[in-house]
């Protein structure tokens, strides 16, 4: 009986401390241009001075990771690898992203392929010229992609890339950076926050007086669906509605199917909820390519705790059972 009273007393103390923290915590929001779009932070802290310091340190972390992983920076590690074909002593961060990419390639049956960079550039040129390429030209480009055949990590962690092949981390680096920011904010004892990078989101805790973080999922820049994200969950959205090229009068997505070697032409958007932003990021791109229901189910079986929504401006095309639960 005494043990029960002590347990109850301890619970009251913990509850009082929790209420005190939330009573004095204030909501702070920040937004800077990072990773090619808005990078937003929303979190609760005791005062603005501390919050400003944490936000500044967070954005510095984002910049440091972008300096490693960005294909748009000539001196980034990934750009150096693409240029020299060999990179000794890569950073831990680049190595982690590349190993995640290898795993993603295998778990998506090759639909998520960071070696697709040369093919994307090829289609960009086709878009500039406005002329659809021949099958012979496409087959030639296919020789330079396929992650498992064009890229290797040896036993000493040296990176080796096949001649004329290039790696593009746009479909996974953003998720990785969000996850790194997630861990950084937790290390600063921030227990309730939202991170958003160009539409990809991960949350921790809950906002004030709410049970979940409510997130709008959109197609054609309209918030069509509302999703409640639990603490720790991430959501990523991919679709041709945001970027496309026009060839011979027809719209083609910026997303290219590594199996067919051609851009997708269907007009829908994909949102994925996962336990981390890396998984949500690469699966959102994957499921924007894969339309066959059996292939979708095969890939989903290889991932735990993943929810999927495919939709267009006309409505839902496919959803898993618990996407909105």
Image (cartoon, rainbow, N blue to C red):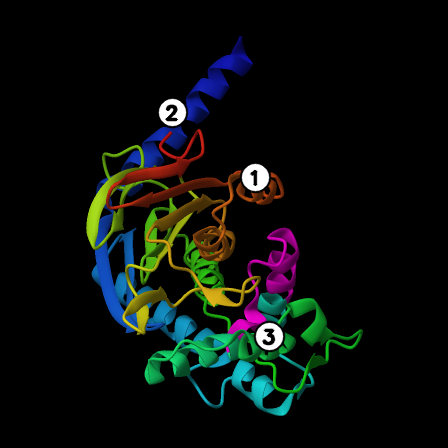
Does 22 sit left or right of 154 as displayed? left
Residue at 43 percent of width and 30 percent of height? 322
Q: Which residue is mark 1?
A: 294
Residue at 51 percent of width and 52 percent of height? 279
Give the SS element for disc 3: helix
Residue at 35 percent of width and 85 percent of height? 129
Q: Please tell me which residue lies in front, 123 or 323.
A: 123
Residue 267, given in percent of the width and then of the height, sits at: 32, 53
Q: Please tell me which residue lies in front, 109 or 37.
A: 109
Q: Badge 1: how crowded within 10 Å, few (<14), some, or many (20+)?
A: few
* Residue 213 in view (yes/no): no
Q: Which residue is mark 2?
A: 12
Give the SS element for disc 2: helix
Q: Nearer the viewer, mark 1 or mark 3?
A: 3
Does 106 sit left or right of 29 as displayed? right
Q: Which residues are magenta?
A: 99-117
- Which numbered disc flags the more N-terminal residue, 2 or 1? 2
- Which numbered disc flags the more N-terminal residue, 1 or 3? 3
Residue at 78 percent of width and 77 percent of height? 156
Measured in 3D between alpha carbons, the distance from the residue under mark 1 to the one under mark 3, in whole angstroms, is 26 Å
Measured in 3D between alpha carbons, the distance from the residue under mark 2 to the one under mark 3, in whole angstroms, is 68 Å
Q: Please tell me which residue lies in front, 184 or 246.
A: 246
- Which numbered disc flags the more N-terminal residue, 2 or 3? 2
Q: Nearer the viewer, mark 2 or mark 3?
A: 3
Q: Which residue is mark 3?
A: 139
Tag of residue 320: none
* Residue 307 in view (yes/no): yes
């Amino acid at each position: 009986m005494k043990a029960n009273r002590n347990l109850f007393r301890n619970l009251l103390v913990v509850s009082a401390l929790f209420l005190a923290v939330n009573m004095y915590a204030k909501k702070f929001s920040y937004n800077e241009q990072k990773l090619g779009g808005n990078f937003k932070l929303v979190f609760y802290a005791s005062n603005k001075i501390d919050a400003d310091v944490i936000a500044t340190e967070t954005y510095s972390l984002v910049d440091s990771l972008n300096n490693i992983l960005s294909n748009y920076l000539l001196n980034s590690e990934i750009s150096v690898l693409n240029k020299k074909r060999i990179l000794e002593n890569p950073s831990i961060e680049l190595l982690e992203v590349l190993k995640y990419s290898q795993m993603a390639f295998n778990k998506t049956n090759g639909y998520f392929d960071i070696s697709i960079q040369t093919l994307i550039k090829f289609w960009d040129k086709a878009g500039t010229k406005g002329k659809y390429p021949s099958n012979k030209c496409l087959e030639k480009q296919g020789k330079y992609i396929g992650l498992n055949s064009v890229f290797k990590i040896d036993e000493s962690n040296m990176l080796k890339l096949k001649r004329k092949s290039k790696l593009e981390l746009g479909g996974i680096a953003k998720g990785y950076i969000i996850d790194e920011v997630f861990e950084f904010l937790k290390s600063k004892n921030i227990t309730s926050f939202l991170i958003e990078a160009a539409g990809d989101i991960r949350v921790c805790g809950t906002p004030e007086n709410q049970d979940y973080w409510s997130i709008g999922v959109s197609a054609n820049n309209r918030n069509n669906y509302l999703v409640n994200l639990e603490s720790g969950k991430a959501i990523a959205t991919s679709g041709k509605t945001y970027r496309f090229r026009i060839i011979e009068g027809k719209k083609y997505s910026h997303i290219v199917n590594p199996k067919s070697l051609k851009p997708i032409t269907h007009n829908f958007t994909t949102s994925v909820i996962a336990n981390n932003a890396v998984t949500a990021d690469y699966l959102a791109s994957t499921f924007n390519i894969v339309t066959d229901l059996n292939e979708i189910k095969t890939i989903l079986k290889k991932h735990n705790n993943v929810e999927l929504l495919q939709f267009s401006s006309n409505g839902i095309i496919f959803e898993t059972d618990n996407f909105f639960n």
